[in-house]
Image (cartoon, grey):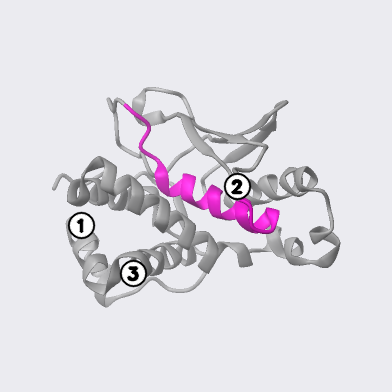
């Protein structure tokens, strides 16, 4: 498999560790090993990433995992698994990060739904912008939120794709919205993707939850 060149942009090691654990949770140990081998990341099988906030997990490694999921399971199967992995990343690790610390508090829980979203989504963006080289922003429209990733890891080194390919991030957003809202599911669609030639990866999030 062609390797994706290192980007020089990185997440903290802890995020890589959470991602690998999420893969194992969704796919089992053998599935995880197969994906890491296919993505050229087999060294993480024997030597897990350190549990720290040092930026040592290159964006290209996320792109390699994304590509390996597609290659092994096809675009459709890979998409479904990526969404599940993204959800597991948030459920198992990301929600414990600083910017989201107050979201579980009683004062937050009694807020109206839209107020929760207004606070929670920027908090998720802030985590990535603060601890990694992934710069994310949130814009509110009448009926939706636009979540924009200005430097995306999932499509690092990918060009000429016909459709958006960044579904791990969509899964992270779905699960974060579920947690922030107290159990609601929301529609999250990637409307623009750097891999298809856009300047950013952009997600449209409907304000009204799915029934």
Determine if the magenta segment contains residue 69. no
Residue at the spot x=18%, y=51% of the render?
Answer: 72
Residue 99 drawn above or below residue 116: below
Around disc 1, counting alpha carbons within 10 Å, would you say few (fewer than 14), some (14 to 19), or many (20 or more)? some
Residue 64 place in picture, x, y as percent: 28, 50
Predominant secondary structure, magenta span: helix
Left or right of residue 18, residue 32 in this image: left
Residue at the spot x=80%, y=45% of the render?
Answer: 115
* Cβ atoms under marks 3 and 2 closer than 8 Å: no
* Cβ atoms under marks 1 and 2 closer than 8 Å: no
- For label 1, the SS is loop
Would you name the residue on which mark 2 appears?
129
Residue 184 place in picture, x, y as percent: 63, 52
Q: CA distance from mark 1 to mark 2?
A: 27 Å
Residue 76 drawn above or below residue 35: above
Residue at the spot x=17%, y=56% of the render?
Answer: 38
Would you name the residue on which mark 1 appears?
40
Determine if the magenta segment contains residue 168. yes
- For label 3, the SS is helix
Closer to viewer: mark 3 or mark 1: 3
Would you name the residue on which mark 3 appears?
24
- Closer to the chain start, of discs 3 and 1, is 3
Residue at far left of view: 1
Quadrant placement of the C terminus: top right
- For label 2, the SS is helix
Left or right of residue 71, residue 82 in this image: right
Left or right of residue 68, residue 8 in this image: right
Instruction: Find the magenta span and give its range.
Output: 163-184
């Amino acid at each position: 498999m062609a390797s994706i060149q290192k980007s020089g942009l990185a997440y903290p090691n802890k995020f890589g560790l959470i991602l690998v654990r999420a893969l194992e949770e969704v796919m089992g140990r053998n599935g995880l090993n197969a994906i890491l081998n296919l993505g050229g990341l087999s060294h993480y099988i024997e030597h897990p990433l350190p549990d720290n906030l040092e930026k040592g997990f290159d964006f290209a490694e996320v792109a390699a995992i994304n590509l390996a999921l597609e290659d092994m399971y096809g675009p459709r199967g890979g998409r479904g698994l990526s969404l599940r992995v993204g959800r597991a990343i948030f459920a198992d690790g990301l929600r414990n990060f600083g910017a989201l610390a107050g979201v579980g508090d009683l004062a937050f829980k009694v807020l109206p739904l839209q107020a929760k979203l207004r606070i929670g989504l920027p908090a998720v963006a802030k985590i990535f912008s603060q601890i990694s080289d992934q710069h994310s922003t949130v814009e509110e429209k009448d009926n939706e939120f636009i979540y924009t990733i200005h430097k995306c890891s999932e499509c690092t080194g990918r060009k000429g794709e016909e459709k958006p390919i960044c579904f791990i991030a969509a899964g992270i957003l779905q699960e974060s919205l579920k947690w922030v809202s107290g159990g609601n599911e929301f529609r999250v669609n990637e409307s623009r993707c750097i891999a298809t030639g856009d300047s950013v990866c952009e997600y449209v999030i409907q304000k009204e939850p799915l029934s």
